[in-house]
Image (cartoon, rainbow, N blue to C red):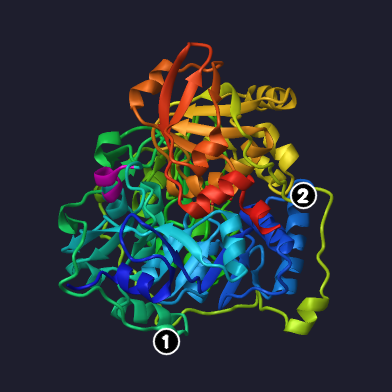
Amino acid sequence: MGKTLTEKILEKHLAGGTYVPGEEIAIRIDQTLTQDATGTMAYLQFESMNIPRVKTELSVSYIDHNTVQIGFENADDHRYLRSAARKFGVYLSRAGNGICHQVHLERFGKPGKTLIGSDSHTPTGGALGMIAIGAGGLDVALAMAGEPFYLTCPRVIRINLEGKLPPWVSAKDIILKVLEIFSTKGNVGCIFEYGGNALAHLTVPERATITNMGAECGVTTSLFPSDDMTRTFLEAQGRAGDWTPLAADVDAVYDKTVTIHLNDLVPQTAKPHSPDQIATVREMENIPVDQVCLGSCTNSSYKDLVTVAKILKGKVVHPRVSFIIAPGSRQVLENLSRDGYLTDLLASGARLMENACGFCIGNSQSPQSAGVSLRTSNRNFLARSGTKDAQVYLVSPETAAAAVITGTFTDPRDLNMPYPEVTMPERFHIDDGMIIPPAPEAEGAAAEILRGPNIGAPPKNEGLPAAIRGQVTLKVGDKITTDHIIPAGDRMKYRSNIPRYADFVFETVDAAFAKRAAEIRDRGEHNLIVAGLSYGQGSSREHAAICPMYLGVKAVIAKSFERIHTANLINFGILPLTFRNEADYDRIDQGDTLEIPDIREIITGSRPLIVKDITKGLEFEAVYDLSERQKAMILAGGALNLRS
Ligand code: MIC
Ligand code: SF4
């Protein structure tokens, strides 16, 4: 029986367990990436492991998220990261060099390698034929320490892309179709492996748009073969030597196969407030648009920006629209500038932002009150743009450009102009001047770590108590994202200061939560959270576990969880429980007192886990799915406790 490409790469890296879908396996990690917002915590944790230098083939620290430096905090974090990179043998991509995923694709990704990154869009690297997975910062720190990465051996879903994209329809419309088919929930433990005859026409940056936003489906990662397109891209990056051909066997067996005919696709959008609220652009026609943002790690490649430059050449931004551009990398910006396209964009009235996450993470460019914002990014969760009443729609660069001209939602096929052809440079202008390579070992060893007053040690948890007893401090519904649990935007500057950042836990859902939870904790009781389906969607930020841990949350009881968040909860000693019978969710209310007697004994033994609702005088069964390794972490109160 033939093998999938996923199986081939994972088997080559297997460091524990057997390749049986659904079972926990451990894999060797070749490359890691961190970004500043999750990176400070990752390097603080790495520091606490007392390992002199990273043990990976390559580790890169990117500064791309918190580049709006209001106050000293962000700049102090940047300085800390620079000093940690020097000390520990890590490449540093400085602020201004670009968004981690775009830069990693351009300069470091390699077919056949494994990469984990402390950012949920790390799967972008799957466009190069690598297994690239998003993880919490602690898991990345452990990989830098040479430890394997644990994951559920995935079920592999084949997505066949057949035919050719019609004019004005692009890679974003493909992944929006995938989201329409698979939605944002129910895909935990799967990998999307792409194939089909359309791949002959899909460039690596286009594939990257698709793998990037696979994260929104909740899959472990997405993967393309490494073929001639991959070689062309790597050659254009001056990295022909990094290419190796890789493909699934022709008789590979998949868990499921879905075929998408590209010729049938039309421009699509994801409506507020979830990436799976898919509609056609035609259905949205004539809605007035206030803001258009072009950029983010999903759609800010040279091809994306040149396409828009060509559409806008000689035109002026509609008076109602504020048009924002954030190129994905300094390389993209320099090439646009050298080839003259930047001038066309600026002449149209574009507002040029830094090559960074910027608007995508809501630390700048929030729309006006109740503003309609069309964005080429990947997430439109409630309040992520920085304002709760914003109406954010996710669109392709082509649809974005059409709205820039008309001031309304417009199907770009109605623009009455020929679809612009973009010729990719055979060789990009390459300038790695903003990447600091690792210092020689001796210099690193002597280097000093530079901190600031906002940078504290990662807090540790206590071991799991004998019994959990406390309140349902919060009951929430389905699809609670990590943006709901702990906001980013202007709150992100407290990422290195857990006691302060914890003040904002669940801010957008219930602003009184943090205070209430802290009071309960200070009375010596525990906090429990009750949730619906797909709890912890979205980002990899482990702060969505660390900050609740700091507030005394001991367990989350949900109908289901997302992968990265589950791992983060366990890493920090919070017990993820699911209802044996989903109907029990309706019987519990916020404020109820719950008790789980003998929880330590239950975790070490095999008794059913019964939760008592003391307030209601009822009980129900909850289940957990923990490997022996994870049980040990839960009992110890988190992974860091196990190491000390
Ligand atoms: C995001 O897109 O939500 C982020 C910000 O990049 C996060 C990481 C973080 O919260 O720092 C992610 O995707 O993991
Ligand atoms: Fe940055 Fe947005 Fe990409 Fe997250 S999704 S890495 S915030 S550009």
Q: Which residue is mark 1?
A: 240
Asked if the magenta segment contains residue 423, the reply would be no
Q: Residue at x 37, y 37 (%)?
A: 408
Identified by mark 1, the residue type is Ala
Give the number of marks: 2
- Residue 247 position in % (x across, y down): 27, 76
- Beta carbon at label 2 within 8 Å of ligand 1: no
Residue 555 picture quarter = top right
Give the crowd class for mark 2: few <14, some 14-19, many >=20 residues within 10 Å: many
Residue 594 shown left or right of residue 514 in the figure = left
Q: Is residue 340 visible?
A: no
SS of the residue under disc 2: helix
> Who is closer to the viewer here, 25 or 389?
25
> Who is closer to the viewer here, 605 or 106?
605
What range is drawn magenta here?
178-183
Asked if the magenta segment contains residue 182, the reply would be yes
Q: Residue at x 39, y 33 (%)?
A: 288
Residue 545 picture quarter = top right
Quadrant where the C terminus is found in the figure: bottom right
Name above or below for residue 129 compared with residue 255: below
Identified by mark 2, the residue type is Glu
Q: CA distance from mark 2 to mark 1?
A: 40 Å
Q: Is residue 485 visible?
A: yes
Q: Residue at x 37, y 67 (%)?
A: 127
Q: Could you say which disc has been placed on residue 112 in the image?
A: none
Name above or below for residue 89 compared with residue 295: below
